[in-house]
């Protein structure tokens, strides 16, 4: 059946006389795919990628085939268990967040660094960064999700050993300002005791995610690596950690990420289909 969109178009509801024309969607897609309508463009991209026409199920498999929904039952089950493990391993943090401190790792560099309240923005962004990253890895690259989750769990467990046996404490300043960032920083201090500092989990967890994003898609990975650098810097500039905590967090992140990416991913880079 030929639609009104032109020769070969089988989707008259998306033809040149439809709302697609008014929204310029039709013509934007035309320049990329040469299709007669939006539906044809979607079909054309799939055919270009797979070399054949296919059912909707095959189209979804082309996009999500390497995610948890395209994995076997055993592999998918392992990922579900890792989701649970990530949640409960994170919860252990609060149980260890108390004194007394055994080590004092403050140096002259730490004393010289200024308090910069605006850095509370990247500092506070870690939870959102973690949730969105793990969800996307799980949906699109199941093995990458497993590597990231295991790396994070490993980083948590190693850190917890230090928190239990060699607890540290950070000396925090009194926040006197009444601007938005100062108020946000006071909330951070109120919700987190000044312990559980060495190694820095903000540093290790965000760095692990950045490493895996670079394996997932470098176009997104580099901007997120830059944001990760801000998160890492924020640990010092909001006075939640010392330099030693940051360095230990980086070492832990690269160690865990190297171990699990080699075990689960090898040298092959994971990437999202265009």
Image (cartoon, rainbow, N blue to C red):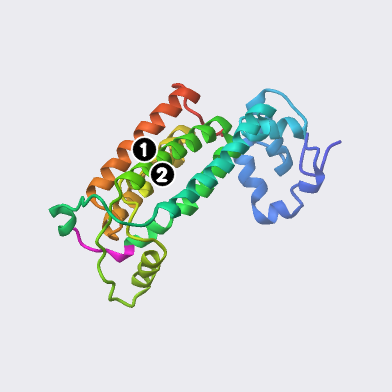
**Point 28% across, 56% down: residue:** 169
> In which quadrant of the rendered view does residue 191 lie?
bottom left
> In which quadrant of the rendered view does residue 239 lie?
bottom left
Give the CA separation, mark 2 to mark 1. Answer: 7 Å
Q: Identify the residue at the far left of this view.
A: 108
Q: Do the residues labelled 2 and 1 touch (CB within 8 Å)?
A: yes
Q: How crowded is mark 2: few (under 14 residues within 10 Å), some or many (20 or more)?
A: many
Position of the C terminus, as image quadrant, is top right
Say which label, 2 or 1, has the lower sequence index: 2
Q: Is mark 1 on a helix, strand or loop?
A: helix
78 or 268: nearer the viewer: 78
213 or 40: nearer the viewer: 213
Q: Can you give x and y, in whole percent of width and height, for residue 97 in the image?
A: 39, 55
In the image, is 90 to the left or to the right of 120?
right
152 or 64: nearer the viewer: 152
Q: Can you give x and y, in whole percent of width and height, for residue 230 in the image?
A: 33, 51
Height in image: 202 above or below 62?
Answer: below
Q: Can residue 25 be seen in this view?
A: yes
Q: Can you give x and y, in whole percent of width and height, for residue 100 in the image?
A: 30, 56
Q: Look at the image and give the residue range highlighted in magenta.
A: 113-118
170 or 14: nearer the viewer: 170
**Point 31% across, 54% down: residue:** 235
Q: Can you give x and y, in whole percent of width and height, for residue 3 in the image?
A: 82, 41
Q: Is residue 210 visible?
A: no
> In which quadrant of the rendered view does residue 60 lie?
top right
Residue that carries the numbered disc 2 in the rendered image: 205
Position of the N terminus, as image quadrant, is top right
Q: Could you say which disc has been placed on residue 253 in the image?
A: 1
Question: Chief secondary structure of the magenta span?
Answer: loop
Q: Is residue 39 magenta?
A: no
**Point 77% across, 43% down: residue:** 5
């Amino acid at each position: 059946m030929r639609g009104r969109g032109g020769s070969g178009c089988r989707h008259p509801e998306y033809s040149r006389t439809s709302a697609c024309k008014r929204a310029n969607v039709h013509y934007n897609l035309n320049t990329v795919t040469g299709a007669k309508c939006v539906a044809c463009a979607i079909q054309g991209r799939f055919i270009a990628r797979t070399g054949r026409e296919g059912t909707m199920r095959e189209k979804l498999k082309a996009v999500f085939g390497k995610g948890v929904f395209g994995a076997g039952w055993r592999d998918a089950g392992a990922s579900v268990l890792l989701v649970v493990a990530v949640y409960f391993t994170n919860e252990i943090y609060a149980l260890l967040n108390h004194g007394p401190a055994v080590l004092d790792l403050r140096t002259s560099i730490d004393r010289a660094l200024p308090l910069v309240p605006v850095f509370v923005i990247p500092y506070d962004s870690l939870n959102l960064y973690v949730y969105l990253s793990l969800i996307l890895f799980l949906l699109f690259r199941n093995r990458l999700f497993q590597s990231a989750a295991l790396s994070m769990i490993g980083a948590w467990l190693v850190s917890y050993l230090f928190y239990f046996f060699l607890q540290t404490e950070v000396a925090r300043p009194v926040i006197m300002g009444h601007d938005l960032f100062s108020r946000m920083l006071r909330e951070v201090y109120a919700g987190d005791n000044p312990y559980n500092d060495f190694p820095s989990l903000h540093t290790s967890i965000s760095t692990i995610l950045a490493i895996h994003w670079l394996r997932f898609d470098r176009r997104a990975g580099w901007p997120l690596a830059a944001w990760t650098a801000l998160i890492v810097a924020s640990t010092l500039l909001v006075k939640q950690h010392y330099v030693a905590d940051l360095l230990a967090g980086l070492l832990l992140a690269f160690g865990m990420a190297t171990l699990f990416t080699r075990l689960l991913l090898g040298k092959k880079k994971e990437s999202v289909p265009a």
